[in-house]
Amino acid sequence: MIDPEGLVPDYLNNAETIGLILSTMIELGGTRFSSNVLLQGSSFARRSKTLAAIETLVDTGILVRTSPTLYQLLCPQDDIQQLFYLLRGAKIAKSLLKEEPEFELVMTSPRKPNALQDVLEKIGPKKCQISRTDEVFEDLAKKAQSKLTVMTPFLDKTGAKFLLNLLSSAGPDVEKRLILRFLSLGSDHARYPTGYDNIKDDLRNLNVSVYDYALKRDNTAWLETFHAKTILADDEYAYIGSSNLDRYSLDNSLELGVFLQGGSVLLIKELIDGIVSISCEHRWSQTDS
């Protein structure tokens, strides 16, 4: 026997994805489910979060893995239905309380094998609350309805390819903005974002507005610039964290950030709009084509 009420706290931070999996099991009935069926039932959710949610259901005794791709339900369907409705009610109650901004932890894990794997295993079911950086970035691009802004201080060839795919996945009517630094120093300078030249023609074709936030100051050789990494979708969703758009950050380094939504994003939008207003906009010329 399970205690549905006792499981709700473990599930609440991934309530939407777990709820979709429970709904799929209720709809299909039976006691045996393939991983593909469970993944398809939450097709709009991020794959890594869905897989983590399935593992949470295993860790908490709802499912047991009988083969690499098959799962057995360990409790009656009535318990699953009760858990589903309790989880949905708890999620609604949490959203109504609005005690704090809604966010989720975002992480890039170093290339496996790595020592961090042992740390994540000790976290247990709570690791399903951590989202992958690349999936969150792609999700932000697809969520954008009117404006998508990417702000990154570093951009190499690997990052440029990722950035181009990211911007291309946003809708054709979405205004796209890219904030870089040190473009004015020229491509021979050590601080120049080396990946930019690889995609500047594609950026022009996508109607991306490019801004250079590296401003001269009076009485000093130091430029006013930035080290922040941010992606903003409209005024509703944002990422703030440590991940650059370069090979090391995307694949080899531990990077942490947060995905934000709701009212807290409005302040981020105001700040980003202000940064755009003081930055030097790149003007496309015939030599760029």
Image (spheres, grey):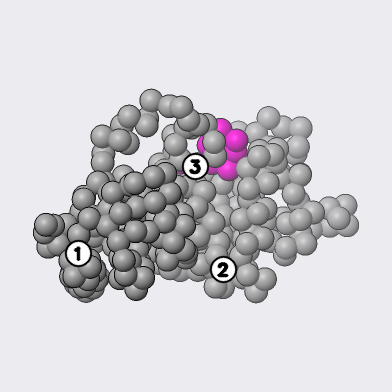
Quadrant (top left, top right, bottom left, bottom right) of the N terminus:
bottom left
Say which mark, if any, is on residue 76.
1
How many numbered markers are drawn? 3
| Quarter assignment of residue 30 | bottom left
Q: Residue at x 55, y 61 (%)?
A: 141
| Quarter assignment of residue 248 | top right
For the record, the magenta segment spans: 242-249
> Which tag, 2 or 3, sits closer to the chain's start?
2
Q: CA distance from mark 3 to mark 1?
A: 44 Å
Q: CB atoms at circles 2 and 1 under 8 Å apart? A: no
Q: Amino acid at mark 2?
A: Lys
131 above or below 79?
Answer: above
Q: CB atoms at circles 2 and 3 under 8 Å apart? A: no
Q: Residue at x 83, y 53 (%)?
A: 288
Residue 243 is a magenta residue:
yes
Question: For mark 2, what is the residue?
Answer: 147
> Which tag, 2 or 1, sits closer to the chain's start?
1
255 above or below 37?
Answer: above
> Does 52 sit left or right of 108 as displayed?
left
270 above or below 158?
Answer: below
Q: Residue at x 60, y 52 (%)?
A: 179
Q: Amino acid at mark 3?
A: Ser
Q: Nearer the viewer, residue 165 or 58?
A: 58
Q: Amino acid at mark 1?
A: Pro
